[in-house]
Image (cartoon, grey):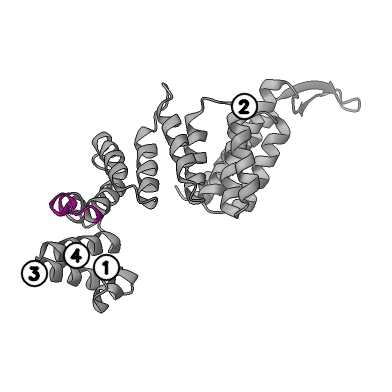
Amino acid sequence: MKAWQALHLLLLAAGASLLAGCVTTTTNTRTGAEVREVKPSNEPADLERRARLRLELAGLYLGRGQFDTALEEVERALGFKADLPEAHNLRGLALSGKGDVVQAEAAFQRALQLAPRDGNTMHNYGWFLCQQQRWPDSDAQFTAALAQPQYRDAVRTLLAQGVCQARAGRWADAERTLSRSFELDPSNPVTAFNLSDVLLRRGELERARFYVSRINAQPELSTAQSLWLAARIERRLGNMQALQEFGRKLQERFPTSAEALQYERGRFDE
């Protein structure tokens, strides 16, 4: 289903839900016929339902990178229910996307005040802090999310935590964290790529080759980045034939990529 079709159906669902709030019946004085009048309800349950519908719209816009529109929907949701933790969480994501660092952090902190054990908010706040290069604070949020008994997104959080540890230059920690993520979901190509990259930086070349080969063995998963990573690993191993083969694939499949240009110029260590 295309995005605009999903959005259209969601708008229809939102309209139906709102109309279901309160139904009254009056009589037309001229014809004597009964007329049904539909009015939105201000009951707490109905207000929360309307708020969550707005959040669904906000999530769709957020996923499309339309941060201003997502933020507008979040504000509408908060108008219905000001203490909804998920709304403040989404508000933090939208503000972060817009580059409003101060307000984004305030939104994440408010979400955690309202729901101190929400692992999803901890994850999002942790990634936000990682983008600000606040490594210890970021790591603490990821660790807190993983410690929540009912948290179900450990693979995603371990991946994000491992990437941030690598950005901080904590290669040993990054390897351990990404390895845990890979154990939980060995089919995830993003985890395999990042783990391979960390192992290359640590000089674990055979292991690095193993993980990136899982990606490149499937043409539909391989990318310019994964082919370039494999080429760099083979160069470090001294396997010039394999290096040239990956370089050829890179030039054929992704001729305009930055990685193809780096290969052509021999910039293997950048």
Instruction: Report helix, strand or loop for mark 1.
Output: loop
Mark closest to the chain's N terminus, 3 or 2: 2
Residue type at mark 4? Ala
Q: Name the residue under label 4.
A: 231
Image coordinates of residue 91 in percent, x first then y, are: 62, 42
Position of 222 with respect to 22 (left or right) is: left
What separation in Å lies between label 1 and label 3 (alpha carbons)? 19 Å
Write down the residue under mark 2: 114
Q: What element carries label 3?
A: helix
For the residue pair 5 and 225, the one nearer the viewer reads as 225
Q: Distance between the residues labelled 2 and 4?
A: 49 Å
Q: Mark 1 points at which residue?
A: 269
State the image coordinates of residue 112 (x, y, percent, origin top left). Answer: 58, 30
**In the rendered structure, which disc, 2 or 4, sits on the residue that comes first in sequence?**
2
Circle 3 residue: 241
Q: Position of residue 183 (x, y in %)?
A: 24, 36
Report the amino acid beneath label 1. Answer: Asp
Mark number displayed over residue 6:
none
